[in-house]
Amino acid sequence: MRYDSLLDSLGGTPLVGLPRLSPSPEVRLWAKLEDRNPTGSIKDRAAYFMIEQAEKDGLLSPGCTILEPTSGNTGISLAMVAKLRGYRMVCVMPENTSAERKQLLAMWGAEVHFSDAAGGSNEAVRVAKEMAAAHPDWVMLYQYGNPANARAHYETTGPELLADLPEITHFVAGLGTTGTLMGVGRYLREHRPGVQIVAAEPRYGELVYGLRNIDEGFVPELYDESVLTTRFSVPADAALQRTRQLLEKEGVFAGISTGGALHAALGMARKAEKAGERADIAFVIADAGWKYLSTGAYEGTLEEAEERLDGQLWA
Amino acid sequence: MAIEVRIPTILRNLTGDAKVVEGSGDNLSELIADLDNSHPGIAERLVDGGKLRRFINVYLNDEDVRFVGGLEAKLSDGDKVTILPAVAGGSR
């Protein structure tokens, strides 16, 4: 397939069946391979849409500085688009993120400011908001509250899924900014009444939940509970086990957050099978495993891998 | 009827630093009332105006209770309840 530029090749990712993990021909699992995007993750869609919108709104002009709290994929995606469009990119990320991500951000020309590991992304969001206040000329796209993030999925990911799988009964994705689930969820609900929208939320080690005060809690502005059918909290050991199973059984080398989505998808599959219902369950491979090799997630026993992952932001 | 409840760090000052406590109740409201008897003050940190607080997430066997009845969510013996503050989480 031929495109005029890298950005033009965004999206249009394959949807592949998982015959070995699907419980039966009536209850099937499908993986949307979002690692096949320009920088290797689903975040390319949101990054591109957010920058396009900011340009349309006259917020961004060449030479501008973009600021974003991000410990990974969104930062990498934004850095790529920013580089091609002539913007300076500054990321705020927690210090306990994988070495690959730091290197990738630097590679695409982003400047990185580290926030304390304690508090995870919450702390990165807080620091970024402070920096934005100190630099009023910088543009914070703010993925957690930017409607263009969810709209990217409403206009691209959702229609792609429905076109490839008109019989879709469930959509499962990881819950972070909530952009994917909100956008795809709204689109599918409008076109497939009765479709189930299922969130898989990663459960981290205690460090990440170490707030001083409950009022420091955070719910992304994009989040609308009514779009979801349900929401699961997936512990690291389950996510790791599923990530390995996906590789072992289907040959798909995915990042660890994908294991969380698969865990929830398999749960829904089990439920449908028990109830004797037909199901076509699509879930998102948010990225491939390359960026997580240094975490040791793919080596040794599950217990060893889980121990190495403790305290890291694995999704 | 014993239900295992995992307590987040931010609330452990109320449970004598215990990570896991036990409680009982036929639904989440009753469980929280029971927890408040053994750990006074905990109900007020979880519930406000008859609803779960915005920045508190409660999971029943890993499923967000807001989708299975909220405070009315039915509980049975052996269920596992996890309380966590809502945070921005990991790498976005």
Image: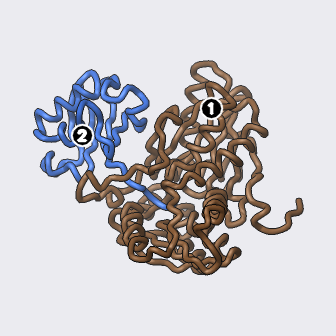
Q: Residue furthest front?
A: A58
Q: Quadrant of residue B65?
A: top left
Marks 1, 2 in one chain: no
Q: Which residue is mark 1?
A: A189
* Chain letter of disc 1 in the image: A
Which residue, as the protein is rendered here, is positioned at the far top?
A276
Residue A104 is drawn in which quadrant? bottom right
| Residue type at the position of mark 2 | Leu
Amino acid under disc 1: Arg
Q: Residue furthest right?
A: A2
- Quadrant of residue B26 within the rendered picture: top left
Image coords of residue A230 (percent x, y): 49, 34
Left/right placement of residue B17 relative to residue A68 reads: left
Q: Is residue A302 above or below residue B61?
A: below
**Residue tagged 2:** B46
Element under disc 1: helix
At a point 58% along the width and 80% down the height, the residue shown is A106
Numbered marks: total: 2
Tell me which residue sits at (55%, 63%) in the image. A299
User: Mark 1 near mark 2, Cβ–Cβ under 8 Å?
Assistant: no
Figure chain in blue:
B
The foreground one among A219 and B76 is A219
The quadrant of the picture occupied by the N terminus of chain A is bottom right
In the image, the chain rendered in brown is: A
Residue A39 in percent (x, y) is at 68, 66
Q: Is residue A41 visible?
A: no
Give percent across and percent down for residue B72.
Answer: 32, 24
Position of A85 compared to A177: left or right? right
Identify which residue, A41 or A227, lies in the foreground.
A227
Residue at point 68%, 37% (across, down): A29
